[in-house]
Amino acid sequence: MEAENNKLGYTDIHEDVVRSIVVTGPKYYATLATAGGLALVCFFFPWFYQLYYGIGAAGMNHPGVWGTYLASFIFWIGLSHSGTLLSCVLHLTNSSWRKAMYRSAEAMTLFSLVVAATYVFVHVGRPWFAHWTFPYPNQWELWPNFRSPLLFDVMAIATYLTGSTIFIYMGSIPDFAAVRDRTVGWRNTMYSLLSLGWRGTDTEWHRLHWAYTFLAVLIIPLAVSVHSIVSWDFAMSIVPGLHQTIFAPYFVVGAIYSGTAGIVTVMFVLRKYMGFEQYITKLHFDNLGKLLLVLSLLWTYINAIELFTGWYSGTSDEYEQLSFKLFGFYAPLYWEMILFCAVAPLLMISKRFRTSFVPMLILSIAINIGMYTERFLIVATSLPRQYLPDAWGFYAPSLVELSIMVGSFAVFTTLFLIFVKIFPSVSMYEVKETMETPKLKPAIPQAGSPA
Amino acid sequence: MSLFSRFMDGWRKYRKPGYYDEFDYHWTMTVDLDSCTGCEACMTACQAENNIPLVGEEELAKGREIQWIRIERYWEGEYPNAKLNFMPMMCQHCDAAPCETVCPVSATYHNQDGLNTQIYNRCIGTRSCAVYCPYEVRYFNYYNHHWDSPLDQQLNPDVSVRGKGVMEKCTFCIQRIRDAKDLAKDDDRRRVRDGEVQPACVQSCPTKALTFGDRKDTESQVYQSMNNPRAYKVLDELNTDSSVVYLKKVDA
Amino acid sequence: MTTCVVGLFHDPQSALAAAGELKNAGFETPELMSPVPIEGVEEVLGKKKSIIKNFTFFGGLIGGISGFTLASVTAILYPHPVGGRPIITIPPYLIITYELTILFGILFTVLGFFISSRLPAIRNRMYVPEAAVDKFAVAVTCENSEHRSRADAIFNGAGAEQIRDMGEED
């Protein structure tokens, strides 16, 4: 697992992780301030402007009533899929290469979901009434419409958010206990509360193992269902090009694909800037690369099938949709998406590529750009070309939308930066499990033992 | 009634597709494409009757018009033999409406008169109903609108003015239907007769291309037009069960 | 007077051996504290029963029933006919049933974890800080000094780095 000449011990990982939490330098604060400032300026201010003046600040029109807000929403939910889902699947298969990276991956899930949830409020026309989508008793005896695909969305994302939070928290309890001993002041209080008095007894480990395993078993079908349900926002309409049964697998595969690419990006940043070079190694990138390759092939297949079924259907509506997508105004975006998501990942067939850090980083960012384009195209090329030709239109995003899109990445980065200073971002006890046990210390008489 | 039969009765009622055993009225509109000249008088009347905002030049250029009824224009052939076909398109009030199921807060539902109603107060503006509508007859208020004086004196007090973030669409002038039903009830509890209620578009059409009535009334004009060999429904293959019947244009 | 004696070991195997010997010597089941879960604990100290699975199962069951009930009953309270569909439709309501099954399963699992592991700890419990870093600790209660010396002998025999007195057990 680790390089033979390194001989990392338990104390090394312990010290490294604790240091990553406790020691903050000016570079960190500068990054946090930049990210927070960008988030405020690019996400919140345009959003407040839009809240005041109306959705008209965005580029949506008739019939392009859905725009980048929904595309971003789906992108962020997709990004959230890989972390927890991958962590659960790899836990159940007892894989060892998951150990160093799953904590940050799960954090990525959590914060993507938070950003996606914020996007809901940006997207709807009257977000101050968004609480009506939750089932709560009220004086009108009005409840939400449980037959609605959008409501399945609300329920699924609420469940996934709760599940992910609980999952990442449960996995971190032993690490909180470990960090608690090394901190003082407000940090000590916080970790004492968070670790719930964990002592590391065999009973506690046993219970944690079983609870964690059950949570993993429950979360895997949940994660698959969440993105299927999100895809049904589109697939349950009768818009040509959206009304396809392939949408649920398409979105799930796309989500895991873009999420895994996100994990690669996060892992690169973590190992470079948090001092985790010894724990996140070429092996992790190699395995992630193999996973990405498989997912890319799956994604290409599903896209090809979509093209084939659209062409084979022979109906004018589907055909018109396809030709608008492939050869219409947004054709360059479509071919860029194919390049980044179907062609470029083939580079990962070579092991040399997979184990080099910077090329993998560039590829993962390219994949995510391609996947964002895919979501954008789904919205922007299907709605303006529906059944009645007189009602065809054109949709292009406005400045406010683009700014909010950039701002959402800044919000995510801010949340993640706060995370690395509060949570142990590499799971200490799991990495220790992969190491050899500490070497025997020379025999020195200790106080309290019989000499 | 025993508990069991009450349960079974409720169960049957709640499991029946469409819920209603029968509608009170089943409002239908007929559009005779042979008579339509594309003059857009119906659009103007609708705008006047229903307080539809004038979005302004800039917004119109961005494609944010609000036209509860619009005239669709299709060219056939090339100059000098070009032919123009007009198709007035308004909310089809489908019995199996795709837009109704998707609203997460039940802001749109099918009422006892067979109308697809929009409840402005409940709408939170997800705009998914506009996506799901294949006829694209649902319009969204992107901004708060204002009426410059003296247009604000022309507003109809029977119709609410919609704020920003709310979906709206043709209601078959439900305020006129309600008034007609009230008058009929006062007048000896009878039913609304054919021709007593006309939405603004029907009333203003110079060529009488639009007719409106209750298709449960077998004597009504709309019922006769449904049996016309020229009758068809737009996008019927989508099984939306629309309530607007179009009469095909006959080329002389 | 009952005291708690803790022996610190540098690797899990010796800790496990010491615990096994203590159990065979008739002490109360010793507690093992470690930074990582130790394999082979159940063979030495006896099988552990976990009630968490019951919590998960009942959580899922309750969630499923409440999901369908929530959707159906709230639909009946104020019937909104939509799209030509019935008021109580099975396929959409199955989705919310599924989601709530999983949600309640998760929540009840967490509850089961808290109950069965007796966390959060309200009162101070005996704790060895080194056990969170790289040492493996075996804790055993001794009634009197004779037990104490026997325990010491077992610890030293198994290769303890340090033996610590933890004082009165609460």
Image (spheres, coloured by chain):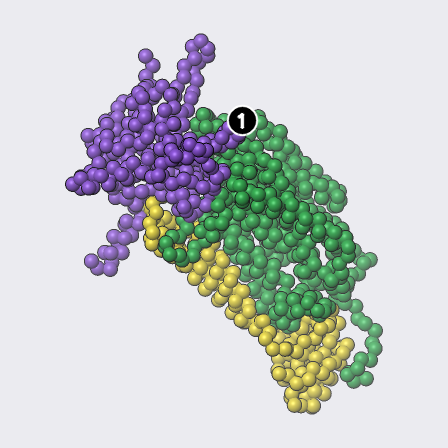
Which of the chains is yellow? C
x, y percent for residue A369: 64, 39
Q: Residue furthest front?
A: B150
Q: Is residue C141 left or right of residue C164?
A: left
Q: Quadrant of residue B22?
A: top left
Looking at the image, residue B194 lies above or below residue B251: below
Query: Which element type, helix, strand or loop, lies under badge 1?
Result: helix
Q: Is residue A240 visible in the rendered structure shown here?
A: no
Which residue appears at 65% of the width and 45% of the height? A41
Which of the chains is purple? B
x, y percent for residue B54: 45, 31
Give the chain of mark 1: A
Q: Quadrant of residue A351?
A: top right
Looking at the image, residue B54 lies above or below residue A75: above
- The three-letter code of the residue at mark 1 reads Ser
x, y percent for residue A203: 60, 72
Q: Is residue A194 visible in the rendered structure shown here?
A: yes
Q: Which residue is mark 1?
A: A323
Q: Which of B152 and C90 lies nearest the eye of the viewer?
A: B152
Which residue appears at 22% of the width and 30% of the height? B220
Which of the chains is green? A
The quarter in which the C terminus of chain B is drawn is top left
Which residue appears at 47% of the width and 32% of the height? B55
Which residue appears at 40% of the width and 56% of the height? A138
